[in-house]
């Protein structure tokens, strides 16, 4: 193919510039660029390029959301997703939404260009392949056709057909729906008997042609399950689709956006401090200003380190690669070192025993709890080291409003955030605390304070 036409969609201008240079050197033509998914749809629609290179995590509209729109606008284009997420995490979702390939950011540019060329060639070969012969007629054609019910049974998402009647009786449910909702979705059973949330959703939107929302459903174990629910009006029944993975992706996208926001603040401070420090040193100003700027950079670097450490800890725990190096440590001394110069908290020690713990992970847990108290609680804040039978309890208590009763069961989940809470942090801090406590043979818990506020407790084995 001579001079393939390319559209680049990525919110990092520097990366688009590198891609533009590499592609032009390879003899390709970059005909359009965009910094978010919504703009990428418009550029792709205008240019109808041979190739679209699409980032996943972007503002305004992310790549997963934009992908099916670009595919609809450019059915003959090759679309390759390029992202910082691991390929095992996102490849299937990207391909399911219309992508032709997946590249991880950090791949050498020469390999990127080779991969894009191969992706173009593969799609071109598929388009030029001869059409399959017409299906045979008679009995052979009947055996070659797959019934629609069988197709629905193979669907990876839950699908229910519901009669548009007063009690919303279930007409039919596929295997994924039965696994998700249980035997209550038997034919003619009222939907409300299985799930009041689903029945309310269907009842409220039964006259709509197509509606999609995220719902919190009670799962078979009595916990909470989030799923994306889509209701469509078919010719003879209401069709209800439930996709838990889509809700997880939405939660992940929200967490990514929040994390990016949290990272930008420290980066801006460090950059501004570095520029100011450079000017200050050139002007030979007083030492006090230099020390203040250096202190700002150090504090913000610690914040960045905490954010990235929590993200890495969560990923390691999920993949079974979390490392814990246990040793005998004195929790009171470690707590004193964590608090010193960083947190406005009082240390109260009534147990001087040693514990078996990883000192680095102990600091990470306590820092997360103190940071949490600073964000959501109110002073005064106390760190208490007290006896708890064969364990030593390390408590962080504040005098804020505490945790709403309806949210306490979700408190230590990944990306959990109470409704109305300020959208700060990654939503991983408390999840990391419990993960690390359990990995060290201990526990992590929450209880309301006797006079109000929140008390978070980590208990570790005493030596």
Image (cartoon, grey):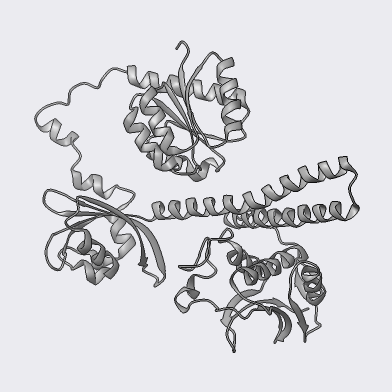
Q: Position of residue 96 (x, y in %)?
A: 38, 40
Q: How many marks?
A: 0
Quarter of the view holding residue 171: bottom left
Residue at the bottom extreme, as displayed: 450
Q: Position of residue 367 (x, y in %)?
A: 70, 66
Q: Residue at x 59, y 85 (%)?
A: 449
Residue at the left extreme, as displayed: 138
Would residue 232 be found to the left or right of residue 283 on screen? left
Residue at the top extreme, as displayed: 2
Q: Nearer the viewer, residue 446 or 178?
A: 446
Quadrant that contains the N terminus: top left
Q: Is residue 452 above or below residue 426?
A: below
Q: Position of residue 218 (x, y in %)?
A: 36, 69
Quarter of the view holding residue 92: top left
Would residue 366 be found to the left or right of residue 142 on screen? right
Quarter of the view holding residue 391: bottom right
Q: Residue at x 48, y 50 (%)?
A: 253
Q: Is residue 206 above or below residue 382?
A: above
Would residue 366 be found to the left or right of residue 70 on screen? right
Q: Position of residue 193 (x, y in %)?
A: 23, 72
Quadrant that contains the C terminus: bottom right
């Amino acid at each position: 193919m001579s001079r393939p036409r390319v559209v680049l969609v990525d919110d990092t201008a520097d990366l688009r510039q590198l891609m533009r240079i590499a592609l032009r050197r390879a003899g390709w033509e970059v005909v359009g660029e965009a910094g978010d998914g919504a703009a990428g749809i418009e550029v792709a629609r205008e240019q109808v390029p041979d190739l679209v290179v699409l980032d996943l995590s972007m503002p305004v509209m992310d790549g997963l959301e934009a992908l099916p729109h670009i595919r609809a606008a450019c059915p003959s284009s090759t679309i390759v997703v390029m992202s910082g997420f691991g390929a095992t995490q996102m490849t299937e979702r990207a391909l399911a939404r219309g992508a032709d390939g997946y590249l991880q950011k950090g791949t050498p540019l020469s390999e990127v260009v080779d991969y894009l060329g191969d992706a173009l060639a593969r799609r071109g070969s598929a388009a030029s392949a001869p059409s399959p012969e017409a299906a045979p007629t008679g009995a052979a054609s009947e055996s070659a056709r797959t019934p629609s019910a069988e197709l629905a049974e193979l669907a990876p998402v839950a699908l229910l057909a519901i009669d548009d009647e007063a009690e919303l009786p279930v007409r039919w449910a596929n295997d994924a729906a039965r696994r998700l909702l249980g035997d209550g979705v038997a034919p003619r059973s009222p939907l409300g008997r299985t799930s009041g949330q689903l029945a309310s959703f269907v009842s409220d939107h039964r006259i709509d042609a197509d509606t999609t929302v995220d719902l919190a459903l009670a799962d078979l174990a009595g916990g909470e399950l989030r799923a994306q629910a889509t209701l469509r009006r078919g010719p003879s029944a209401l069709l209800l689709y439930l996709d838990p993975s889509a809700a997880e992706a939405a939660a992940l996208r929200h967490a990514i956006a929040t994390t990016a926001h949290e990272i930008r603040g420290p980066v801006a401070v460090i950059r501004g401090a570095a520029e100011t420090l450079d000017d200050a040193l050139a002007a030979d100003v007083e030492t006090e200003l230099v020390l203040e700027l250096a202190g700002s950079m150090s504090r913000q670097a610690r914040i960045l380190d905490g954010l990235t450490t929590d993200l890495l800890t969560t990923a390691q725990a999920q993949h079974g690669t979390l490392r814990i190096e246990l040793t005998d440590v004195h929790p009171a001394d470690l707590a004193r070192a964590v608090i010193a110069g960083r947190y406005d908290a009082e240390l109260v020690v009534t147990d001087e025993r040693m514990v078996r713990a990883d000192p680095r992970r102990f600091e990470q847990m306590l820092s997360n709890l103190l940071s949490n108290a600073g964000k959501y609680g109110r002073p005064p804040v106390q760190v208490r080291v007290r006896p708890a039978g064969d364990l030593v309890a390390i408590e962080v208590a504040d005098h804020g409003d505490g945790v709403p009763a309806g949210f306490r069961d979700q408190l230590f989940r990944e990306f959990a955030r109470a409704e109305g809470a300020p959208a700060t942090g990654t939503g991983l801090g408390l999840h990391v605390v419990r993960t690390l406590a359990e990995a060290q043979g201990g526990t992590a818990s929450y209880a309301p304070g006797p006079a109000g506020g929140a008390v978070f407790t980590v208990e570790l084995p005493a030596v």
